[in-house]
Image (cartoon, rainbow, N blue to C red):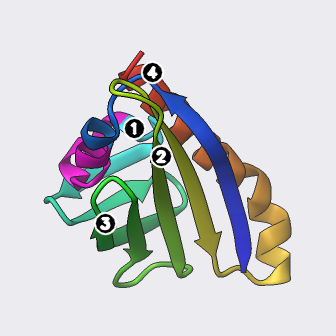
Amino acid sequence: MAIFEKKNIPVHASCETVYSFLGDFRNFEDLMPEQVSHWKADESSCSFTIQGLADLSMRIDAKYPCSSISVVSEGKNPVNYRMDYFFSAKGDDQCSVSIVFDVDLNPFLKTMASGPLQHFVDMLAEKLQEKYA
């Protein structure tokens, strides 16, 4: 397993607003990088293609209002993974979000994929902040 994370991301929106946004995959297309195509989503699941790499599918496994959301890989993915979002209210119009991406990688893949996967988590954090800037 390899863990990629970004902790305590300050977001200028209420915990409820950010939780509602991240709790619906139909909103995620705005957070995806340009390399993502064939985006399909409903509230609790999504699938997409990362150009030149893989087709991925995921679903929301658990939601705890304004506390956490857990997303897991689903179907035929090249690797199994889990992404957790943790929320902490910092006032009426501010919250903190932490992203933890836990990926089942063998040592060889871990060496090759660590940089891009950490970049992916960092990019999600950045786009989330931009959305509520």
Instruction: State the separation of the CA atoms marked 2 and 4.
Output: 18 Å
Q: Residue 102 magenta-drawn?
A: no
Q: Tag 4 or tag 1, which sits nearer the N-term? A: 1
Residue occupied by mark 2: 88
Nearer the observer, disc 3 or disc 1? 3
Q: Nearer the viewer, residue 45 or 23?
A: 23
Q: Which mark is residue 120?
A: none
What secondary structure prevails in the magenta region?
Answer: helix
Instruction: State the separation of the CA atoms marked 4 and 3.
Output: 24 Å
Q: Amino acid at mark 1?
A: Leu
Instruction: State the separation of the CA atoms marked 3 and 2.
Output: 12 Å
Instruction: State the separation of the CA atoms marked 1 and 2.
Output: 20 Å
Q: Tag 3 or tag 4, which sits nearer the N-term? A: 3
Residue occupied by mark 1: 31
Give the SS element for disc 3: strand
Q: Is residue 4 left or right of residue 30?
A: right
Q: Which residues are magenta?
A: 19-30
Q: Amino acid at mark 3?
A: Tyr
Q: Which mark is residue 64?
A: 3
Alpha-carbon neighbours of circle 3 within 10 Å: few (<14), some, or many (≥20)?
few
Q: Which mark is residue 130?
A: 4
Q: Tag 2 or tag 3, which sits nearer the N-term? A: 3
